[in-house]
Image (cartoon, grey):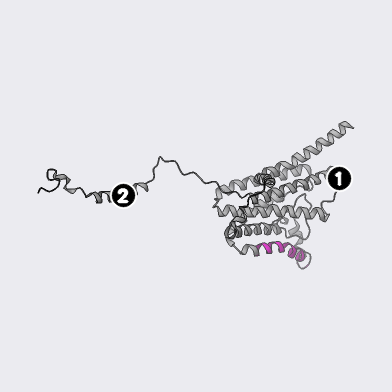
Amino acid sequence: MAAPYADFPGLWCLPSAGARDGIMAFCLRRLSRVKNPLASPPLAIAPTRFDAVDALRGSAMVWMTIFHFCFDLSHFGYWTQDFRNDPVWIGQRTVIVSLFLFSAGLGQAIAMHQDQGWRRFGQRWGQVAACALLVSAGSFAMFPRSFIYFGVLHAMVVMLPLARVTYGWGRWLWLAGALALAMPWLAQWALSGPLIDWAAHFNARSLNWLGLVSRKPYTEDYVPLLPWLGVMWWGLASGRWLLEHFPQGLQVRLPAALRGLAVLGRWSLSYYMLHQPVLIGLLLGWGWWRGMAG
């Protein structure tokens, strides 16, 4: 009997059907690994936002607005209050700043967990730095003797990169935060006693932004690096712990009444920059209207 393909000698080299299927599968696997230069790049996955964190930041914004409105009423003579010495107002300011910086630490933990790159971080950091300069310029126009040169935004310009590079400290962030909170108390004791000769240097504007002072400077807003970096570190540590051990705590669904706070928290920087000009404008308009009506 003639061999298969006897009339076609060149086809003696053709593999069997099973072998052909194996070769075809191998070729398809190899081709699937070849990148098509004309193909569109994969779409970037948007980072996940947590409404609970945004709402916490939004609640700080609402409380801050009430606080600043009362401050403006006092400044324009409608309701005299002592914001520099009254423990009620000092305590409220402390809680507001703590909420703001703690939520910033939470946000940095989430950003690092989602592999946010330095480029995207730098864009946001640049916005905060620009707004800090605007706050200094605006406060200098209103309060030239007590303008804001190291307020909450200035502090964040320094703290945010520090939080990012110390993210890997893990559980040591708790201890670092505690030490940061304690350092100003130790510095005040030392600069008022054994190191009193150094007090003038640390109390000067060139160094008092560190927070290691024997007396607070005269300024409209003062948020030094210490102790406030400790609050951000504790927010960072809390965010790490929640993401690793209890992520559902960040994914809690907010009731409808609180969703507005989450929206406000997403636009916190813009809101922060706009709320005081709006409040001051309203009070100036109110004063002008009262003058015209009288």
Which of label 1 and label 2 is nearer to you?
A: 2
Q: Nearer the viewer, residue 36 or 249?
A: 249
**Considering only order in the chain, which callout, 2 or 1, is on the residue closer to the N terminus?**
2
Q: Which residues are magenta?
A: 175-194
Give the secondary structure at mark 1: loop
Amino acid type shown at disc 2 = Ala
Q: Position of residue 219 (x, y in %)?
A: 77, 50
Q: Nearer the viewer, residue 120 or 79?
A: 79
Residue 166 visible in the displayed image: no
Q: Position of residue 129 (x, y in %)?
A: 65, 47
Left-right relation of 249 to 42: right
Residue 6 visible in the displayed image: yes
Residue to which mark 2 is pinned: 25
Bin the neighbour count of mark 2 within 10 Å (Cα to Cα): few under 14, some 14-19, many 20 and up: few
Residue to which mark 1 is pinned: 79
Give the secondary structure at mark 2: helix
